[in-house]
Image: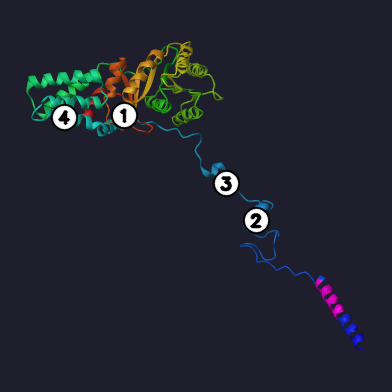
């Protein structure tokens, strides 16, 4: 009897477990909770839209069919027609600004000399200090010797200690050393049926491309028509940089459509297009190269020879960094041998008190400084004026 009851109980337990499992398996799915409408959306519209109802875009709407809506056109925004062309600063205005900067940056030279010459006793030690001051200003040995000897003689004969008189004596000697009689005119006048051709050369890092761009602005300020030639085909960004400078003042740039193109061919095409367009000046930017790289210097000579098939190159401007000092003289000598430099552009003259490099490079090459750069601004390039330069030193 007990055995029968045990079997019946066991069967009942198994049956109840099976029913429970079956109930769990067929349990109905949970009903989805209705989500609240997105901001601006009518309730009950999870994805589709009732016709005629306003609907603001919500999260995820970019995946739906775009809604018809009015869009602003370019004309609505009011954009200017074509690129904005700048008007460069006039030459006279920038000269005044450059003189002020030069006076601030180089006043240590002039003031130091005046302080030495105004001492009660001008003994040998004082004259040695005067000489050291000039040498530290990169004036060069020969010009320094001539200036000191002339000053010693004039002070001895006149017996003066008046600061104003000494300043005038120093001004006269410095002005003589700078060379006021040198021809500093830029050859940028049309030559008959062809434009004037100006090549800009120099070592790496002196700012040749920037100088070409600033020179273009200077010429545009003088109402000249200019074409730029991007013959620096080694530096990938050089042509783009030059074109940007040109675009800012409405000047076209002739460039190659591939990197590493023949720079002589680009320069030739620039002069050709400038001649056909009857412009006043063609400015040719060349790649920077070290003066001791024979192959690169030979290539520079080739660029000039190819350009001269159109006619003479009227101006070869060598860009020198004023902070390089005497090393700049060695650079100048080699470049002058290869392409017959006709003028010097001194950049970064505002960042150094070594204004004597003007005298040194002219004495070394017999070539005048024609342009000076005194800052990074677009119009911080101006013709060099000896009297203004000396007056700024002594201000």
Q: Earlier in the sequence, mark 1 or mark 3?
A: 3
What colouring does the structure picture have? rainbow
Q: Residue at x 30, y 16 (%)?
A: 364
Q: Which residue is mark 1?
A: 349
Comparing marks 1 and 3, which lies closer to the viewer? 1
Which span is picked out in magenta?
13-24
Q: Residues within 10 Å of mark 3 (few under 14, many from 20)?
A: few
Comparing marks 1 and 2, which lies closer to the viewer? 1
Q: Earlier in the sequence, mark 1 or mark 2?
A: 2
- For mark 2, give the secondary structure: loop
Question: In the rendered image of this protein, does residue 44 appear above or below residue 165?
Answer: below
Q: Earlier in the sequence, mark 2 or mark 3?
A: 2
How far, Cα to Cα, is label 2 from label 4?
78 Å
Comparing marks 2 and 3, which lies closer to the viewer? 2
- For mark 1, give the secondary structure: helix
Secondary structure that dominates the magenta span: helix
Q: Quadrant of the C terminus?
A: top left
Q: Residue at x 64, y 59 (%)?
A: 55
How far, Cα to Cα, is label 1 from label 2?
60 Å
Comparing marks 3 and 4, which lies closer to the viewer? 4
> In this rendering, would 221 be left or right of 24?
left
Q: Earlier in the sequence, mark 3 or mark 4?
A: 3
Q: Earlier in the sequence, mark 2 or mark 4?
A: 2
How far, Cα to Cα, is label 2 from label 3?
23 Å
Label pair 1/2, CB-CB below 8 angstroms: no
x then y, percent, for residue 53 = 67, 60
x then y, percent, for residue 140 = 26, 21
**In the image shown, does 264 or 229 lie closer to the viewer?**
264
Q: Quadrant of the N terminus?
A: bottom right
Q: Which residue is mark 3?
A: 72
Q: Which residue is mark 2?
A: 60
């Amino acid at each position: 009897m007990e055995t029968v009851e045990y079997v019946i109980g066991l069967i009942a337990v198994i049956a109840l477990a099976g029913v429970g499992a079956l109930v769990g398996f067929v349990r109905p799915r949970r009903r989805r909770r209705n989500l609240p409408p997105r901001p601006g959306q009518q309730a009950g519209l999870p994805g589709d839209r009732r016709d005629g109802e306003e609907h603001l875009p919500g999260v995820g709407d970019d995946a739906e069919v775009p809604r018809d809506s009015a869009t602003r056109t370019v004309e609505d925004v009011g954009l200017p027609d074509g690129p904005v062309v700048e008007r460069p600063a006039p030459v006279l205005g920038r000269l005044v600004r450059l003189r002020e900067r030069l006076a601030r940056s180089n006043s240590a030279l002039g003031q130091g000399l005046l302080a030495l010459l105004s001492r009660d006793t001008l003994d040998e030690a004082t004259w040695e200090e005067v000489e050291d001051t000039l040498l530290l200003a990169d004036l060069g040995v020969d010009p320094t010797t001539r200036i000191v000897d002339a000053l010693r003689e004039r002070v001895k004969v006149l017996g003066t200690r008046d600061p104003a008189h000494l300043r005038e004596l120093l001004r006269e000697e410095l002005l003589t050393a700078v060379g006021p009689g040198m021809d500093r005119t830029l050859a940028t006048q049309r030559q008959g049926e062809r434009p004037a051709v100006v090549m800009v050369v120099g070592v790496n890092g002196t700012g040749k491309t920037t100088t070409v761009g600033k020179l273009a602005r200077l010429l545009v300020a003088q109402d000249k028509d200019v074409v730029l030639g991007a013959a620096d085909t080694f530096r990938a960004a050089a042509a783009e940089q030059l074109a940007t400078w040109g675009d800012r003042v409405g000047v076209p740039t002739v460039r190659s459509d591939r990197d590493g193109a023949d720079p002589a061919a680009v320069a030739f095409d620039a002069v050709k297009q400038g001649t056909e367009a009857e412009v006043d000046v063609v400015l040719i930017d060349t790649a920077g190269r070290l003066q001791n790289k024979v192959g690169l210097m030979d290539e520079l000579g080739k660029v000039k020879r190819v350009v001269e098939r159109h006619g003479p190159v009227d101006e070869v401007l060598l860009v020198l960094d004023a902070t390089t000092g005497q090393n700049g003289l060695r650079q100048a000598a080699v470049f002058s041998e290869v392409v017959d430099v006709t003028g010097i552009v001194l950049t970064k003259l505002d960042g150094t008190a070594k204004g004597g490099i003007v005298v040194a490079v002219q004495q070394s090459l017999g070539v005048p400084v024609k342009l000076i750069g005194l800052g990074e601004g677009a119009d911080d390039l101006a013709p060099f004026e000896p009297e203004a330069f000396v007056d700024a030193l002594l201000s």
